[in-house]
Amino acid sequence: AQSVTQLDSQVPVFEEAPVELRCNYSSSVSVYLFWYVQYPNQGLQLLLKYLSGSTLVKGINGFEAEFNKSQTSFHLRKPSVHISDTAEYFCAVSLTDSWGKLQFGAGTQVVVTP
Amino acid sequence: ETGVTQSPTHLIKTRGQQVTLRCSSQSGHNTVSWYQQALGQGPQFIFQYYREEENGRGNFPPRFSGLQFPNYSSELNVNALELDDSALYLCASSLDSGANVLTFGAGSRLTVL
C-alpha cells in the first residue's frame, strides 16, 4: 500500500517570501502524485500533478513541484507568496491504475502574513 | 461547464440516525469518488462509483453505502451514525480516462451530536 507524509503541519511565511512544502511518499509500485489546495470552507482544488515525463511540474498560481524518485519526494515550491496563498495544502498519491482513489497526506497549513 | 455540486452544505444529526448526502458530478464525468475529511486531517477515500457500480472501497464499514444514477450523480448514505462520523464529506468526479484528475465539490459538513 502507498502512503504520504507531509513533514510540516504548519508553515508561517511572510508575503513575497518563498515557500517550500515537503511531501514524501512510499510505494512499491509506480504512482501518480498531486498537490491540492483547500481554502477555508471550500473543497479541494488541483494545483499540479505528476504523471510521467519531466520531473519538474508547473501548476497554477505560480506553484511548481519536483518529483524525486530516489528520495521518494514531491516537494511544492513558490518563489514569492501572496496573502491569498493562505490555505491548507495536501499532497496526494495514487496507483497508476486506480483513478480517483487518492491517498492524502495530513496537510500543511500555510499562513502568509504581511 | 458546471462543476461538482453537493447538498446539503451543512447538517446536524444525532447518534443512531441515518443521513443521505447528494452529489452532482461535473458535466461529462462518469466516475464519482467520496471522501471523508475529519477536522484537521486529510481526506480519506470512502468508495468510488463507476457506471453505477461500486469500483473500490476504502477502510470504511458497511454502514457507509452509496449509489450512482444513470446521469452519474451519486448519493452517500450513512446508517447508525456515530459521533466520529462528524466530518466534511467531499464528492469528486472524474473521467475514467482522466488519469486521476479529480474535480471536488465544496463538501457537506455533517455534525453528529
Image (spheres, grey):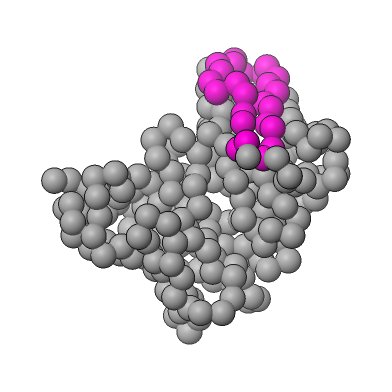
**What residue is shown at x 85% (from left), y 41% (from top)?**
B52
**Res A98 → quadrant:** bottom right
B30 on left or right of A100:
right
State the count of labels. 0
Q: Is residue A95 something that shows in the picture? A: yes
**What residue is shown at x 39% (from left), y 66% (from top)?**
A64
The residue positioned farthest toward the left in the image shown: A114
Magenta segment: does it hold B20? yes
Across and down, in percent, residue A93 comes to 57, 62
**Res B89 → quadrant:** top right
Question: Vertical placement of B97 versus B6: above or below?
Answer: below
Across and down, in percent, residue A106 comes to 45, 52
Q: Is residue B80 something that shows in the picture? A: no
Magenta segment: does it hold B98? no
A85 on left or right of A107:
left
The residue positioned farthest toward the front in the image shown: B1
Quadrant containing the N terminus of chain A in the rendered view? bottom right
Question: Vertical placement of B89 versus B113: above or below?
Answer: below
**What residue is shown at x 39% (from left), y 35% (from top)?**
A40
B9 on left or right of A86:
right
**What residue is shown at x 35% (from left), y 60% (from top)?**
A62
Q: Look at the image and give the residue range highlighted in magenta.
A: B2-26
Considering depth in this image, is A71 or B5 the residue closer to the camera?
B5
Across and down, in percent, residue A51 comes to 59, 70
Across and down, in percent, residue B44 comes to 58, 47
